[in-house]
Image: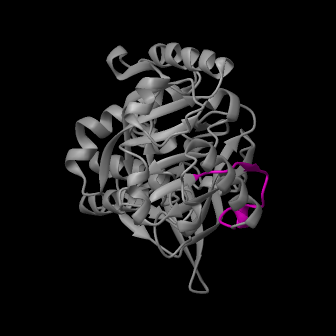
Amino acid sequence: MTFDFDVITIGAGVIGVAISDELAKNKYKVAILERNPRVAQETSEGNSGIIHGGFDPTPGKLNATLNLQGRKIYEKSWFKELDFPWTKIDSLVLAFNKEEMSEVGKLYKRGLTNGVSENELKVLTKEQVMKLEPNVNSNIVGALLCTASYVVDPVLLTQSLVKRALKYKAQLFLNHEVISIKSLTSGFKISCRTNNKELSFTCQYVINAAGHYADEMANMIDCHDFTLKTRRGQYCILEKTERNIINNHVLFMVPTIHGKGVIVAPMTDGHILVGPTAIDNVAKNETRIITVDDIKYINKIGLRLIPSLKMNKTCKVISGSRPISVETDDFVIASASNNKNFINVTGIKSPGLSAAPAIALLVAELLK
């Protein structure tokens, strides 16, 4: 059978576009279908933009392996080859008591287990932290320092990847909402709704990178290999006048106790990011909604990290969400159990942005 495309990727967030870019580079004829009018309007847009060093994920999980691999690809190639803003920063995980300081020690060992280099991690005393960040809460007792972190603009990163994918002859179809997928003898027929019309494409392989809607895409071919739930996080963005409140660090609470909790981080455009919250099981069409209660919580925790933080300088509030795999709480990157040519790429929570380059390579290997 002759197909319109070798591969169709559903979803033009950073993950779907990164995969499509890699496949197009490897001479696959690729189409990207996106229901929104622009790329990166969902999970990728409501994102902290942090490329994590790799000390946080649970050792042995796929997201831990791909976090480190992805971060190194950013360093070796993406930062050099792609045109998007990025800044080298360091991470500080702040501990406020002995229990949290004990967890900092465990995070240090976890980082080494994950493959983070010894010269990229260090446990600091209170005095060392205060020298690095004089405005942090003086009640801290110490911190973990990771010197292998970065901050990027995830939307501009995705746009840069799209430009490169198009140079490799990939095709992008915006405002194309997938309404059905039918398995053929050796491929698929995908029908889309666009401008009140229906169009169909055929392909040999499907990459299901549809974020929160990946389960619905999989169900269209009677694949029920995973279950997703939403986790919405809200951020407050402070005006550029507040940039000097922190130096070149992203400040975390201890993740093993607080989840990743609220962070305070510099952005590539000179603003300060405070957030996110974490609310499970919101409706899929409400993952970008803002709530006043979340803003109050962000204010409270942000001030715990930096008491002099001027939360009244908030100039923008955004919200985003992560699709969480209920079964594994890990990335799900595998062919559908009932069709090896349909590859699910879902459950991409943090550190998904960090892992994006490695996810792309893994999917390319699956296709081979």
Q: Residue furthest bottom?
A: 196
Q: Is residue 27 visible to the viewer in this orientation of the structure? A: no
Front residue (pair 333, 94):
94
Front residue (pair 93, 124):
124
Residue 346 placement, left or right of 167: right
Q: Check the image and report above or below for 58 versus 47.
A: above
Q: Give the range drawn in magenta.
A: 275-289
Residue 282: within the magenta? yes
> How is the structure coloured here?
one colour
Give the residue at x 46% y 66%: 239
Q: Where residue 91 sits in the image (x, y, percent)?
A: 44, 35
Front residue (pair 332, 138):
138
Give the residue at x 61% y 49%: 303
Q: Is residue 157 visible to the viewer in this orientation of the structure? A: yes
Q: Where residue 273 sits in the image (x, y, percent)?
A: 50, 55
- Which quarter of the rendering shows the C terminus? top left
Residue 121 placement, left or right of 322: left
Residue 118: within the magenta? no
Q: Check the image and report above or below for 332 versus 165.
A: above
Residue 278 placement, left or right of 350: right
